[in-house]
Amino acid sequence: MSDTLVLAATTGAVRTLTLNRPQALNSFTAEMHRQLRAQLEAAADDPAVRCVLITGAGRAFCAGQDLAEISSGAVVGNVVERLYKPLALRIRSMPVPVVAAVNGVAAGAGANFALGCDIVIAARSASFIQAFSKIGLVPDCGGTWLLPRLVGRAGALALAMTGDKLPADDAQRMGLIWQVVDDAALADAAGALAARLAALPTRALAQTRLAIDAAVGLGYEEALSMEAQVQRDMAQARDYTEGVEAFLGKRAPTFTDR
Ligand code: T3D
């Protein structure tokens, strides 16, 4: 029987997935990819799950690809196409919001995996490293797309070329991540954020992600048309009726769409 490399726990409507190879700083093996994908599918298919929270066991979030596994024979290009690309796309297509709670170092594909989540909250001692250049690679797991959009071309190139360790506070100042909290407060702060998102109309939140990502490639007028189309769809959903009725009735809404 294989080890449990991704722990899953549910609190209310929040499914927490914990990368669990602390002895190798939660670096990705093919088996950890497989288990993470299975857990993401299970969360996507479970109507009771309204937010996914991803974190790491031990002192790291994720150190990217397990370099020992690669040197033992896996083919680099294949791994990126076969494992990292579907992972990044799965995160982007989750029907509920995805929060990354970065508890320690996030390096290489581990950094970009975190940055591809919807909201990134980090412990103050955490850091982000585009470690690729140090081993003769280029950013992957969405890094080439994400970094310039998050911090602009200048910041993206500097981070990717130097591979310097970026402390969480600097990452937040640059707009790479959303929030930094004291280490001891991370689990509670991330849990509270995830619970808050879970109580919101999660279908509209997932559509918000899609619309914002789509708008990046559109002109202003096209973006306005796309918004009108998405809004038409959202207005057909129960959550919209519930939100408006709750507002007018001066009561708290109960959102159920997904
Ligand atoms: O197929 C492909 O390769 C393409 C896909 C690429 C995607 C990528 O992610 S490429 C980038 C891969 N990641 C890295 O290059 C990061 C390598 N790790 C580090 O640079 C450092 O470990 C950290 C800066 C992340 C942390 O440094 P530090 O000093 O806090 O910890 P450490 O002592 O280096 O690591 C602790 C242990 O974890 C150590 O094992 P040991 O000696 O205690 O048995 C170390 O070997 C292991 N570890 C850390 N990162 C990895 C790893 N083992 C395998 N793969 C790793 N990526």
Image (cartoon, rainbow, N blue to C red):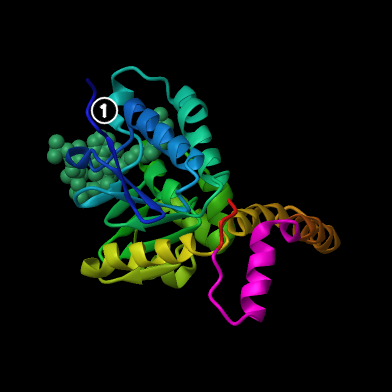
Check if residue 192 falls in the magenta segment. Answer: no
Of helix, strand and loop, which mostly describes the magenta segment? helix
Which residue: 43% across, 60% down?
A: 120
Q: Residue sitting at 75 percent across and 61 percent down?
A: 235
The residue pinned by badge 1 equals 68
Q: Nearer the viewer, residue 150 or 203?
A: 203
Q: Is residue 72 visible?
A: yes
Expressed as whole percent of the image width and height from the top left, the position of residue 188 reads 28, 66
Task: Report which quarter residue 149 is drawn in.
Answer: bottom right
| Label 1 residue SS | helix
**From the viewer's perspective, is 186 left or right of 117?**
left
Quarter of the image with the N terminus in it:
top left
Residue sitting at x 41%, y 61%: 194
Q: Looking at the image, which residue sits at the far top?
A: 73
Write down which quadrant ligand 1 falls in: top left
Instruction: Residue type at mark 1: give it.
Output: Ala
Residue range in magenta is: 234-254
Q: Quadrant of residue 229?
A: bottom right
Q: In x, y percent, where is residue 151? A: 53, 63
Q: Is mark 1 within 8 Å of ligand 1?
A: yes
Residue at 48% x, 30% y is 80
Percent of width and height locating residue 234 = 72, 58
**Along the line of sight, the residue nearer the viewer: 76 or 222:** 222
Is residue 241 rendered to the left or right of residue 125? right
